[in-house]
Amino acid sequence: MASTPMLSNRSHLTSTNNRYIVSLKDRVQAEKELTFLQEDGFRHLETFDFKEENFPGMKGDMVLVELQDGSSAHHALSQLSQDPRVEFLEPDEEFGLEDFVGADAAQLASEEAPPNPEARRRPNDLNRRQWGLDNGRGTDIDAPEAWARTVGRRSGGPVIAVIDTGVDTNHPDLEDNLWRNPGEIPGNGRDDDGNGVVDDVHGFDAYHRDGEPEDAHGHGTHCAGIIGATGNNRRGITGVNWRTQIMPIKIFDNSDKPKTSLSAMLRGVAYASNNGARLTSNSWGGPSRRRSLERAFESSRAFHVMGAGNDSQDNDSKPFYPAGYRVNNSVSVASVDRRGHLSGFSNYGERSVDLAAPGSSIYSTLPGGRYGNRSGTSMATPHVTGVAGLLLSLAPGLSNAQIRALLLRGVTPEQDLQGKTVTGGVVNASNSVELLFRGRGVEGSES
């Protein structure tokens, strides 16, 4: 079975919670400029913190409002949408998490091939179940070959935001590689750095709007381990990056059937860029296209890696978002199994899905200091995010266009992926790193 936060929404022309995202044509300089919202029957709840320096493509502010009289929704929405200060508005929809948890943790060890004898640098905790990093079949991402060049960096390395269900910040294989907010003093109950969040030492819970992005579900912790479980520490597993800075951003609640909202997603993307994330990993999505979220990703200075989804469908004809936004600062990722074949659950698209990565039976971290297997494009996505992290550890000045070019030009071609993805290949860490060293794949690229 496959594991991915697939978002199912209850889409209506009017919001079920009377809340709406309003995109304004201009930036708001003073609170009094928003009085027209109240005149139109709306209460201003929040102005999303999309700072101009971190979201240069966003010309106007976005605000969250609540309709004060639900019985007059049609008239009020019509009035607001025609206001010359408003570019567009859309419901602050709530999304449920359709979880497909892989329960295949026991099968991999007996099927795994011996380690690649030509691996050039191997940590003492590269688990033989981590077939996606290294195996004897040639269907891995050639991580040991890339590690001969770099194993990632904490100090001076890229901050990688995992926008997901949160991360177990006490996991012994993750705690050393968590981002630490330099402006926050732990546990003093204050917003020391003035970013609007109290005690956000390691990250942000965008759903509950606090500084405790703990994972009550497991999905985000699993993705974080693939990117950056501490390497060479004789414990558990290693991530694609032995050393890195993972910024947990939680956009789901803690219920048995987790849910999120469009406003939580927007807060998460804003926090990531405003607090220095160079990369974001997004293993979630659904069929609804939302202009506000597309604008947030597109306007951000960060590079975004996005899962293509687990519906076994062609995204060219039936798009899956946010992977389907096709913004220039992102890639969309499909999943392959250990044979190098497209995973049976994976979405694909010759024009809309850029490349693939290992996503079937992936062994990684789970909450409570545990480890286990999960499957999905959710697991493929952080493999690609991790490779982007290695590239930036070597060349922090790479533009988004250069990161994208190095990832796409470095793939290992796979016959089964021809006509299924843009590149027809699987991400290859070693190839991309070598392209960087040879200066290929970066020339002529502009951010």
Image (tube, rainbow, N blue to C red):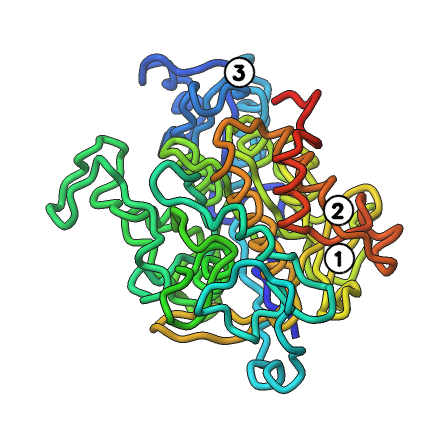
Image coords of residue 419 (percent x, y): 89, 50
Compared to residue 321, the image places residue 292 above or below, namely above
Is residue 86 visible in the rendered image? The answer is: yes
SS for callout 2: loop
259 sits to left or right of 107? left
Residue located at (59% from left, 25% from top): 88
Question: Which image quarter is the C terminus in?
Answer: top right
Residue located at (80% from left, 43% from top): 422
Question: Which image quarter is the N terminus in?
Answer: bottom right
The residue identified by callout 2 is: 353
SS for callout 1: loop
- Please report whichever mark, 1 or 3, sits nearer to the chain's N-terminal start: 3
The residue identified by callout 1 is: 347
The dot on residue 25 is 3
Image coords of residue 185 (percent x, y): 15, 42
Compared to residue 32, the image places residue 145 above or below, namely below
- Please report whichever mark, 2 or 3, sits nearer to the chain's N-terminal start: 3
Image coords of residue 41 (percent x, y): 43, 28
441 sits to left or right of 38? right
Image coords of residue 427 (percent x, y): 68, 51
